[in-house]
Image: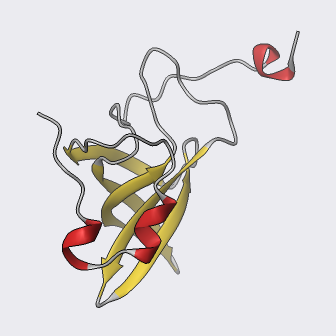
Amino acid sequence: MDAASLIERKTLDHIEDFQPGDTVTVNLRIVEGDRHRVQAFQGAVISGKHRVERSPLPGDTFMVRRVSYGVGVERIIPFHSPNVDSVKVDRRGKVRRSRLYYLRGLTGKKARIKERR
């Protein structure tokens, strides 16, 4: 018996199924003083995946990467964070690896991911 089997898994209805290579939009709750707002972060998933039938354990994360003004920005997002409002899949990517860290060294057309149909 391992520790993962003792922890009860919660279903995450606000997160769609995704896998590495998919382009997702993550809506995050931002707190500025006493005001709250929702900010979208759109990019490619380079690690982590989510399936509805097997929800992630507490502490599991996924990483989203985007290029903003020529600078690569990566964000590690916990699945069970109360600041994650929703995760929506925009495009399905066709990749052959589970960790896409090689995208960090690519720019332009070489950094594109083919679409899964």
Which image quarter: residue 19?
Answer: top left
**Seen from this angle, which residue lies furthest left?**
117
Looking at the figure, which quarter contains the C terminus? Answer: top left
Looking at the figure, which quarter contains the N terminus? Answer: top right
Seen at 77% across and 21% down, the residue is: 4
> Where is 107 relative to 58, above or below?
below
Residue 42 vs residue 84, the one in the foreground: 42
Place of residue 84 in the rendered image (x, y in percent of width and height, measured from the top left): 46, 51
> Where is 25 relative to 32, above or below?
above
Seen at 46% across and 64% down, the residue is: 102
Is residue 29 among the parts visible in the rendering?
no
Seen at 33% across and 48% down, the residue is: 21
Place of residue 110 in the rendered image (x, y in percent of width and height, measured from the top left): 25, 69
Place of residue 83 in the rendered image (x, y in percent of width and height, measured from the top left): 51, 55
Is residue 90 among the parts visible in the rendering?
yes
Residue 74 vs residue 6, the one in the foreground: 74
> Where is 96 relative to 39, above or below?
above
Display colour scheme: secondary structure
> Where is 64 relative to 37, above or below?
above
In the image, taking residue 23 as reference, residue 55 lies left or right, namely right
Residue 71 vs residue 29, the one in the foreground: 71
Residue 48 vs residue 100, the one in the foreground: 100
In the image, taking residue 86 as reference, residue 50 lies left or right, namely right
Which image quarter: residue 88?
Answer: top left
Seen at 52% across and 18% down, the residue is: 54
Which image quarter: residue 37?
Answer: bottom left
Number of marks drawn: 0
Place of residue 34 in the rendered image (x, y in percent of width and height, measured from the top left): 50, 76
In the image, taking residue 111 as reference, residue 84 lies left or right, namely right
